[in-house]
Amino acid sequence: MKMKGDMKEKLLTSGKTNIEEEEFKDKLWNEIKKMWIVAGPAIFTRFSTFGVTIISQAFIGHIGPAELAAYSVVLTVFVRFGNGVLVSTWLWLFS
């Protein structure tokens, strides 16, 4: 009776097994599809956030120069603060 993980079982096979080996391009295509499932929404989020920021700044620029300057300063402070928190948390987690 042969058990799973038997010591005498050959780990390296010569030639094709029962399951046909996939070609390189098929493996590559499958990995790319899996990657885009994760990366696609992240890329969309990044672009949409950037777009909202730019459009908001353009509309506030039509109100007046003082409002545009105030928005730019506040946005810069908040973005730098948020990035600082994210980076410091990342460094704390992985150090």
Image (cartoon, rainbow, N blue to C red):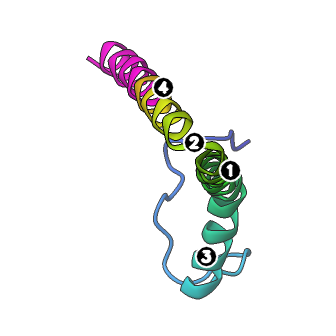
Mark nearer the viewer, 1 or 3: 1
Q: Which residues are magenta?
A: 79-95
| First in residue order: circle 4 vs circle 3 | 3
Residue 15 on image: x %, y %:
54, 84
- Rate crowding at label 1 as few (under 14), some (14 to 19) or many (20 or more) other CA atoms within 10 Å: few
Judging by the rendered image, the residue that carries numbered circle 3 is 27
Write down the residue under mark 1: 59
- Picture coordinates of residue 40 (x, y %)? 68, 59
* Mark toward the viewer: 4 or 2: 4
Circle nearer the N terminus (2, 3): 2
Tell me if residue 74 comes above or below residue 14 in the rendering: above
Which residue is drawn at the image coordinates 65% and 82% (left, top)? 26
Lower sequence index among marks 2 and 1: 2
Residue at image location 30% in from the left, 20% down from the top: 91
Badge 3 amino acid: Lys
Give above or below for 50 relative to 89: below
Badge 3 marks a residue whose secondary structure is: helix
Verify CB contact (< 8 Å) between mark 2 and mark 3.
no
Upstream in sequence: badge 4 or badge 2:
2
User: What's the CA distance linking mark 2 and mark 3?
Assistant: 29 Å
Whole-Å distance between the Cαs marked 2 and 1? Answer: 70 Å
Q: Earlier in the sequence, mark 1 or mark 3?
A: 3
Whichever of callouts 4 and 1 sits on the residue coming sooner in the sequence is: 1
Mark on residue 74?
A: 4
Task: Check disc 4 and report its element: helix, strand or loop.
Answer: helix
Location of mark 2 (residue): 6
Q: Amino acid type of disc 1?
A: Phe
